[in-house]
Amino acid sequence: MNMQDLEKCLIEVKDSRLKIIVTDGVFSMDGDIAPLPEIVALAKKYGAITFIDEAHSSGIFGPTGRGTQEYFGMKG
């Protein structure tokens, strides 16, 4: 995931009332893990909501299998 492209998109919609960033936690085709700390930082910076599809990470990532949020030590 390219954080510069994501930030560019967020800047383009800066005046929108609702902004949502939607990402997979783990991308199934390559097994790449989404850079959640960077994504959440941009979401906070631009007032966006972050939605994470944990279908490929639940039960696998994190100490208790709760997905990429737990893997990165993030809550909520």
Image (cartoon, rainbow, N blue to C red):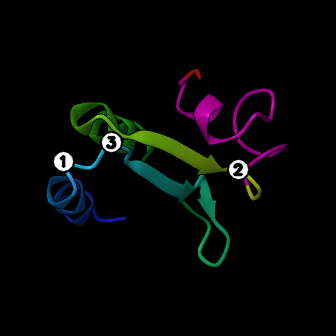
Q: Is residue 64 magenta?
A: yes
Which residue sits at x=55%, y=24%?
A: 73
Q: Is residue 67 visible?
A: yes
| Residue corresponding to mark 1 | 15
Residue flagged by tag 3: what amino acid is it?
A: Glu
Q: Is residue 21 above or below residue 46?
A: below
Question: Answer yes or no: do the residues labelled 2 and 3 have beta carbons within 8 Å?
Answer: no
The residue at the far right in this view is 59
Question: Answer yes or no: do the residues labelled 3 and 1 have beta carbons within 8 Å?
Answer: no
Q: Is residue 1 above or below residue 15?
A: below
Which residue sits at x=23%, y=62%?
A: 9
The residue at the far front in this view is 17
x and y, in percent, of residue 68 in the image: 62, 41
Mark 3: few/some/many CA within 10 Å (<14, 14-19, 20+): few
Residue flagged by tag 2: what amino acid is it?
A: Glu
Q: Which circle, 3 or 1, is nearer the viewer? A: 1
3D distance between C-alphas at marks 2 and 1: 29 Å
Image side of residue 48 versus residue 3, left or right: right
- Residue in the foreground of this view, choosing between 43 and 65: 43
Which residue sits at x=32%, y=43%?
A: 17
| Residue corresponding to mark 3 | 38
| Residue corresponding to mark 2 | 54
